[in-house]
Image: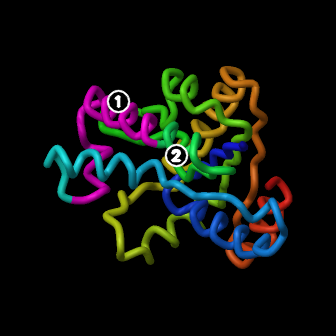
Amino acid sequence: MTMVVVTGMPGAGSSTVIKEALGLIKGRTKRERYSVRNYGDIMYEAALEEGIVRNRDELRRLSVEKQREIQLRACDKITEWRRSTGHIIIDTHCTIKTPAGYLPGLPEYVLRKLKPDLFVLIEAKPEEIMERRRKDKTRERDVEAKSGIEEHQFMNRVVSMAYACLTGAPVKIIKNHNGGLREAAEEFAELL
C-alpha cells in the first residue's frame, strides 16, 4: 500500500492536479486504486466537532497548540484509512502560514505515524498564485505580496526536504503553470 503526500501552498493547484491526474489513470488496472484524503478537511471536521471554528480558513488562526492537537487527531483517522485502503493520496499543505510563523503541515510525530512513500510539491509562479487566489470566491484567502509567496514556496521546499530526511521518501517538484495543468497532471500520474 502506497501513501503519496501532495502539497502546495494555497493557489498552487495541488488539489486540481490530483483530480486531473486521477482522471488520466482511470482504467489502468492497479494504478487507479487511489483514495484521496484532504488533511485540512479532516482537521476542519475535528475542529467543527469541538465548535472552535466556523469555516476551514479559521484553522490557521487557532493557537499553535490547538492546531497540533487537531493535526494529531486527523493523523489518527488517516492512519486508520490507510489500513483499510489500497493506495492513498494525502492532499495537504507542507507549511501553514500562521500569525505565529510557519507551522509544519506534517510534524515529525505525524510523519512517524503516516509513513509516507513519496512527497510531491506542486508549485506555480507567484503571479499565478496571486491571480488564482483573487479569483477563488469559495475561500477566505489571505492577500499576500509576491515576496511573501516566494518566501512561502521556499519554506515549502526546505520543509519538504526535511520531511524526506525524516522518512527516507523522495520529493518530486511539479510545476503547475497557467495553461499547463495537463502537463502537471501527466507528470504526477506517471508517479502513481
What residue is rendered at 24% in x and 39% in y? 62
Please tell me which of labels 1 and 2 falls first in the chain.
1
In the image, the segment drawn in magenta is 55-77
Instruction: Between residue 81 and residue 168, name the one nearer to us.
Output: 81
Residue 11 image offset from top left, x and y in percent: 52, 63
Please name which of the two marks, 1 or 2, marks the residue nearer to the observer.
Answer: 2
- The amino acid sitting under disc 1 is Arg
Q: Mark 1: few, some, or many residues within 10 Å (few <14, many ≥20)?
A: some
Instruction: Between residue 90 and residue 106, name the one nearer to us.
Output: 90
Disc 1 designates what residue? 68
In terms of image quadrants, where is residue 153? top right
- The amino acid sitting under disc 2 is Trp
Q: Main secondary structure of the magenta part?
A: helix
Residue 83 image offset from top left, x and y in percent: 58, 40
What residue is rendered at 57% in x and 63% in y? 15
Instruction: Between residue 111 and residue 101, name the one nearer to us.
Output: 111
